[in-house]
Each structure stands twice: as C-alpha cells, then as structure tokens.
Image (cartoon, grey):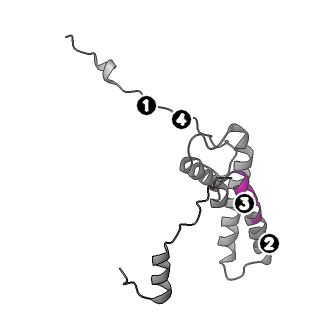
Amino acid sequence: MPRKAADALVVPIPTTKRLHPPPDLSERAKAEFIRIVTCEKPEHFKTSDQSLLVQYCEAASLADRAIKEMQGDDAPERWLRTWEKAVRAMSGLALRLRLSPQSRMPNNPTRRPPERVSYYEREALEHGGAEQD
C-alpha cells in the first residue's frame, strides 16, 4: 500500500458565509456587529438584513455613549432623550432581526395536554394521606 502524500492529509477548513461589517461603521458599532454576527448561526442573517443590523449596531453604540455621558456629574437632559430613542430603535430592530428571546420562539409552539392524575393520587392530595417523597 503506497504512502499518502502530506497534501492528502490536510483537512479543508469549512468557510461560512457570515455578514461582514461595512467599512464606514463606527468602532463601537463594528464591535457590536461582530459580536452579534458571531453569536448567531451563520445562516441566521441574510444579505438583505445588513442595513437593519447596521442601524441596530449604531443605535446600540449611541445608547452606550449616552449612558457614559449621563454618568457624569453635569449630564445634560439631551443624553437621556438620546438614550431613550436609541433603546426604542434597538427594541424594534431586535424583533425584526430575531435577536430577542421572544422572536426566537417558534411561531406555533406545541402544547401538551395536561397530565391526568389518578383518582388515588387526587384523594391522597385532598386528604393528606400520602407520604411525601
């Protein structure tokens, strides 16, 4: 049996098609973009989602900046309004991008019928005659 060449032993690294951050994204927003894209499955986002994801990341960046500005002693009220608007934008975009826990739930959850309790178990519960495990 002939020896295998070293080239034959190399396992190709599977590449995934993830969205890449656009070059004009701010540094904070770029970090958020990369965090979100790497936390989700590669097929979660489509190319058409990129503009919504960019807006979400910019809103997250703005909300983060507003929080830092409000922590100062002489924080103007405009930062509170800025934070509120950014968080409102984030919550709407998170649902559309399926980033929130509610949006990840299946649309048609299966419900199990309630478990039937035997007559003897019910009597034991009502009259306190059963021993606790």
Q: Check residue 90 in the rendering and tell me which mark sits there, or answer none.
A: 3
Q: CA distance from mark 4 to mark 3?
A: 27 Å
**Which residue occupies 56% across, 52% down?**
35
Question: How much space separates mark 1 and mark 2, taking CA atoms?
Answer: 47 Å
Question: Looking at the rendered structure, which numbered label has been put on residue 16?
Answer: 4
Q: Position of residue 114 (x, y in %)?
A: 57, 66
> Quick one: SS at disc 2?
helix
Image position of 5 (left or right of 17): left
Q: Earlier in the sequence, mark 2 or mark 3?
A: 2
For the point 56% across and 45% down, the residue is: 41
In the rendered structure, which amino acid carries the disc numbered 1? Ile
Above or below, 125 relative to 54: below
Sequence-earlier tag: 4 or 3: 4
Q: Nearer the viewer, residue 75 or 87?
A: 87
Q: Nearer the viewer, residue 20 or 110?
A: 110
Q: Is residue 50 magenta?
A: no
Question: The residue tagged with tag 1: helix, strand or loop?
Answer: loop
Mark 2: amino acid: Arg
Name the kind of residue labelled 3 in the image: Met
* Mark 1 neighbour density, 10 Å: few (under 14) some (14–19) many (20 or more): few
**Alpha-carbon distance for marks 1 and 4?**
10 Å
Checking the image for residue 13, the label placed there is 1
User: Callout 4 environment at 10 Å: few (<14), some (14 to 19), or many (20+)?
Assistant: few
Look at the image and give the residue range highlighted in magenta.
88-99
Task: Look at mark 2 in the image and give the residue it sits on.
Answer: 81
For numbered disc 4, what is the local secondary structure?
loop
In three-dimensional space, the C-alpha distance between marks 2 and 3, rounded to whole angstroms, equals 14 Å
Relative image position of residue 7 (x, y in whole percent): 33, 19
Relative height, residue 43 to residue 6 (above, below): below
